[in-house]
Image (cartoon, rainbow, N blue to C red):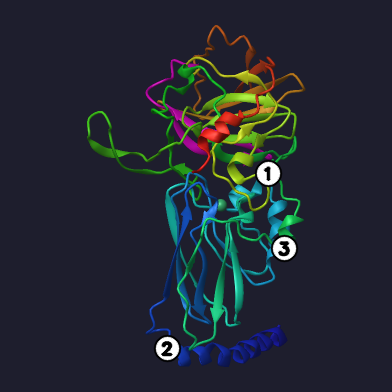
Amino acid sequence: MNLSLSSRRLALLACLPALVQPALAQKPDKAEPLKVSIKVIPGAIRFETTRFDVTAGARVTLTLSNDCVMPHNLVLLKPDAEPALVAAVNTMGLEGMDKHFVPDVPGIVAATKLLQPFSKENISFTAPEAEGDYPYVCTFPGHWFTMRGVMRVRAAGVALAAPVKSGGGVEQVPDALKNSGMTHKPLGTPEKPFVMRTFAPDPGLDPAVFAHHGVGKDGVKYDPATRLDVIGKVTDPATGVVKEGPVVVKAEKGVAGAIAVNHGLEFSYVWDSTECRLLYVWRGGFLDMDTYWGKEPGSGRPKMYIPRLMGHLVYRASGPMPLEGEFKGAPVFLGYKMEKGVPEFRYRVGTKTYREKVLPAGAEGFELRITPEQPERPKAWVVSPEDTAVTSVRGEGDAFVVSVKDRPEPPQPAPKPADEAKTKKP
Ligand SMILES: [Cu+2]
């Protein structure tokens, strides 16, 4: 005990000169922190600033602004830390979203949270003492091929160059990343699904399903830290009245605020946080992110924001919200948490709160498991007459379970070349 205590004191004393020395040299208490502002280029999977300089040991305040429709972060690394980071992010799976895709590995100098669309964050850190090139990347799966830059640490007294902006060209991809095994078609497993909050394709669902999506199916802004929708001052487009309410994110197309979940090749679904219900289920693949991330490393082409559905649909929702007698205005999404490895969505309908899970049940069906948080069960689960896929609704403990049988549809078509040409950048 005594020994370890005294050795800790010794270690502290040994550090002291190193701490004091640069402080005397630079008077950091008087020096303003160096301000660095980095924007995300909307839709391009790129940082606007690809290089900036700092002085060794200086205080730095970095602002990351995400005005893009996709989530992004910024992780600043020691010069040789990238391969280990790539390997670690690759194995994060569903943990990734919870940890903002920042794994617990050495060599991270600073990192932002995973910023949801149209949000920003300031982080402060002390620039490393060692001169050199410190890469920064976005670790959202697939993004680091193109979403990267370098912080150059310069010796005290060396003039700092102006930040370099992205020319929009393809930056070089380090070999370590080319061989990382990173895929543009992320997959989960039956036990450990992959969860991605994204823009999902709309495979032509019954418009009645989208009762609470605005024109263009805008979504509600989401804060991953609190796992709640962001509430702020919003203007009612009809009356012009400003009041408190969920902050809306404008969608390009597709279903904004969707949560796509993949249990492996055999089972995927999209649950919509605006309508607070399951939208559709498919088998045979997940989402092809080529349109989102670019086909080849470094090619990130923002021709569309919406990933392509791979495989064939086996269920699509139709008609209005099936919780009959409960419905008072729009449902409110309250976030989700992982329950024994699978997401459980929580939402409020009127005054009642529910938790909902979607679980594969064999090769030809699945179950919705809905648990009310109040003693009363809902009056009924009413499906539209067309929704013959629902085979039973039964009570099971606190929950009620809706069993659904697959109704397979033909495979989803590949995007037409005409679509590509139409959205190609001039
Ligand atoms: Cu990103």
Q: Position of residue 299 (x, y in %)?
A: 63, 50
Q: Position of residue 172 (x, y in %)?
A: 65, 61
Above or below, 26 against 293 in this view is below
The quarter of the picture where the N terminus appears is bottom right
The Cα atoms of the two marked residues, 1 and 2, are separated by: 47 Å
For label 1, being within 8 Å of ligand 1 is answered no
Asked if residue 98 lies left or right of residue 93, the reply is left
- Which residue: 57% across, 78% down? 128
The Cα atoms of the two marked residues, 2 and 3, are separated by: 36 Å
Above or below, 77 against 169 in this view is below
Magenta stretch, overall SS: strand
Which residue does the numbered mark 1 point to in the structure image? Answer: 184
Which residue does the numbered mark 3 point to in the structure image? Answer: 83
Q: Is residue 337 visible?
A: no
Residue ranking furthest to the front: 426
**Is 336 inside the magenta-drawn segment?**
yes
Asked if residue 214 lies left or right of residue 418, the reply is left
What's the magenta region? 323-349
The label nearer to you, 2 versus 3, is 3
For label 3, being within 8 Å of ligand 1 is answered no
Q: Position of residue 4 (x, y in %)?
A: 70, 84
Q: Is residue 355 visible?
A: yes
Report the disc number at residue 45: none
Report the disc number at residue 27: 2
Secondary structure type for disc 2: loop
**Is 154 inside the magenta-drawn segment?**
no
Above or below, 366 against 33 in this view is above
- Which residue: 65% across, 90% down? 10
Asked if residue 368 lies left or right of residue 246, the reply is right
